[in-house]
Image (cartoon, rainbow, N blue to C red):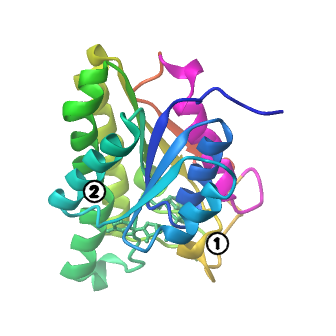
Amino acid sequence: MTRTELAGQVCLVTGGARGIGLAIARELCSRGADVAIVDVLDPDAAVRTLQEQGIRAAGWQADVRDRGQVRHCVDGVVGRFGRIDVLVNNAGTCGRIDLEHMDDATWERDIATNLTGTFLFTQAAIYPHMKAQGSGRIVNISSVSGIMGGLDASGESGGRSGPAYAASKGGIIAFTRWVAKEVGTLGITSNTVAPGAVATPMTDKMDYPLGGQAIKRMGRPEDIAAAVAYLAGPGTSFVTGETLKVCGGAAIG
Ligand code: NAD
């Protein structure tokens, strides 16, 4: 079945060169969207695989922590595709260091990439573009670490994230809610997807404890992509300020 619910929509996915971001880009394309990928890595290979399937896709190599580069990307997407309907703030880093050993550089990198990057892209996409359109969807990728304080909060060992990561991901949830309240009257929604442990290059070689999960497997990037597409789709225009956990029941409570 060919899905078309995002036909004519322009989506920007940060951190889209690999992992969850690439799966999100593929999923949005499979529903008819045009997609722009932004990544600090060269996004060309990812963009080419989409273009080979006849999709209108483009890539920008940029650092989400840099205000000038962020503005350049967002304006570039609008210049190329004419609009920006969906922003997915997915780029992220995770310093797996506990509080005792946390250093300033790792702390600042995770906060700047995960939280400041989300702020910069959201601001640049809404003001002026989504505001002028009178519509838009912001979907931010947090983590159950931002809710539970770490993926091993079940008490099992292994699978640690880190305090900077947890703080940045919790900050994303609060930021998302703030934005939802500020832009609701502009026709824009703002929601968060909070994944549990997902098999990607970020978690490569990690031994995740699955005992605390109801569903005893690692998540797949496609599991997260489906949730993002749901929040970007036509059925969720009345959903805003929410956090959708996609974690196999790791954070049921
Ligand atoms: P990944 O490392 O495979 O992908 C992250 C992408 O972000 C990479 O392509 C990387 O180059 C890009 N990136 C990093 N810093 C950047 C920067 N400064 N500017 C632009 N791009 C940058 O990781 P992933 O597992 O696919 O993670 C994607 C998102 O999902 C992240 O926000 C991560 O925190 C979140 N998440 C992942 C898991 C998991 O278990 N994998 C769990 C919860 C949340």
Q: Please report the bounds of the magenta region as a residue range.
A: 214-237
**Mark 2, residue position:** 117
At a point 21% along the width and 51% down the height, the residue shown is 71
Residue 73 forms part of the magenta stretch: no
In the displayed structure image, the side of residue 200 where residue 215 appears, left or right: right
**Label 2 CB sits under 8 Å from any ligand 1 atom:** yes
Quarter of the image for the C terminus: give it. Answer: top right
Residue 244 percent location from the top left of the image: 53, 37
| Mark 1 residue CB less than 8 A from any atom of ligand 1 | yes
Badge 2: how crowded within 10 Å, few (<14), some, or many (20+)?
Answer: many
Which one is nearer the viewer's eye here, 67 or 56? 56
Residue at 37% in and 45% down: 80
Residue under numbered circle 1: 208
Residue 97 x %, y %: 38, 80
Q: Residue at x 65, y 68 (%)?
A: 199
Earlier in the chain: of badge 1 and badge 2, it is 2
* Magenta: main secondary structure: helix
Q: Is residue 161 left or right of residue 230?
A: left
Which of the 4 quarters of the picture holds residue 3?
A: top right
Is residue 20 visible in the rendered image? The answer is yes
Residue furthest out toward the left:
68
In this view, the residue in front, 100 or 170, is 170
Q: Say which element carries label 2.
A: helix
Rendering quarter of residue 135? top left
How far is mark 1 from mark 2, CA to CA?
27 Å
* Residue drawn where x is 19% and y is 32% of the image: 128
Q: Amino acid at mark 1?
A: Tyr
Q: Secondary structure at mark 1?
A: loop
Q: Is residue 225 magenta?
A: yes
